[in-house]
Image (cartoon, rainbow, N blue to C red):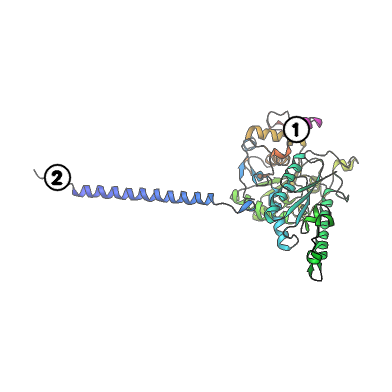
Amino acid sequence: MAPVRTTGAIVASTAAISISMAIFSYFLFFKKTNSTLHCNKKKKPRNGVVDAIGNTPLIRINSLSEATGCEILGKCEFLNPGGSVKDRVALKVIQEALESGELAPGGVVTEGSAGSTAISLATVAPAFGCKCHVVIPDDAAIEKSQIIEALGATVERVRPVSITHRDHYVNIAKRRALEANELAAKDKKVSQVDGKDRDQMDGCVPDPEKENPGFLSHYNGGFFADQFENLANFRAHYEGTGPEIWEQTDGNVDAFVAAAGTGGTVAGVSTFLQEKSPKIKCFLIDPPGSGLFNKVTRGVMYTKEEAEGRRLKNPFDTITEGIGINRLTKNFMMAKLDGAFQGTDKEAVEMSRFLLKNDGLFLGSSSAMNCVGAVRVAKALGPGHTIVTILCDNGMRHLSKFYDPKYLAQYGLTPTATGLEFMSIK
């Protein structure tokens, strides 16, 4: 019997196996290489605390998205090194001041702040070899000034007064920078006699503590950050936050909403987004006691309290901190807004508890108000839209007021809602 010829089959089979193994090995190697490169890219260290600022995650707020039928997205600015959106501003302000020569290495940055900007400046300044001095209203949450001092900055707590008063915390901060510059100039002048260092004269060394008492005598001049009027604030968001939102949504965003304090965030983001697409609607959410809502909707800076003549020197207008204002800043005037909404303290309080319970988001007062704004916008536009807002900071620096049951009870703000009924959503 003739032998069966199998050589061709064996060769073909062997060739098929070899090709399969080659393809398998290629994809295995390709996947492994890509995975390794991806991991290396992700694990590449950033250059210090400064390089860790920005590029924060944009997350879907599930509970609000499902309740409204819109995609409501929050930019997690509380994940910045200093814990808030103000890190971006602090970085931009200090960088520009150093580049222009207005701030010298070893100088002190001064600012009047209700808390978050001060914390960010105290975080960023040491990275550039500078110090920080903050003037803060004494009605701000105590934990904010404690954090600032723990970061190595000096703190002045002063009573809240009108911005027109010379002792408004912002005006005091501006004076402190001028005083630091005057002392630095005086020290430089008296330290030299005929081109020689005075400490080389007569073999004695001067005591700067006795000659220039107070903390200002230790610094190489001062620089007033001026977060309200310094357009570096606007540029931080026009060049950073806005482009990040555009990239993270692949340009698929219908609306942006945020509250305003200095106005830098809402101005920078709204200007950038509307330059990319005029179809994107940008809105303001305004807390009680602020005149910006009426300015945007009616063209007049106006509040009910002022109209009725009931405004006090230290009024209780809102328990939210860092947002709401009764004057126009240079930063806010850069904003491109299509409209404005008003939020209440009760809505902000209820929103913060709702998000904590349903999403695990522990947010500060301004973040909660921004989420109130996002729901307002969602209801106005209807289902199917993508709305972005800013999650400015977390609740850790709001424990003594916004998250304190006794404090809230004093003003009838004890949270009672079980769902979103406070936003008229069942």
Q: Residues within 10 Å of mark 2 (few under 14, many from 20)?
A: few
Q: Is residue 406 magenta?
A: yes
- Residue 268 visible to an observer of this rendering: no
Q: SS for tag 1?
A: loop
Q: Nearer the viewer, mark 1 or mark 2?
A: 1
Label ID, residue 376: none
Tell me the kind of residue under disc 1: Asp
Q: Which residues are magenta?
A: 404-415
Give coordinates of residue 248: x percent, y percent. Answer: 59, 49
Q: Nearer the viewer, residue 214 or 408?
A: 214
Give coordinates of residue 120: x percent, y percent. Answer: 71, 49
> To which residue does mark 2 refer?
4
Q: SS for tag 2?
A: loop
Residue ranking furthest to the right: 309
Give coordinates of residue 224: x percent, y percent. Answer: 78, 55
Q: Is residue 347 magenta?
A: no
Q: Quadrant of residue 377?
A: top right
Label ID, residue 404: 1
Q: Residue at left 90%, top 39%?
A: 310
| Separation (CA) of disc 1 from disc 2 | 91 Å
- Look at the picture and state if 207 lies above or below 298: below
Figure quadrant of the N terminus:
top left
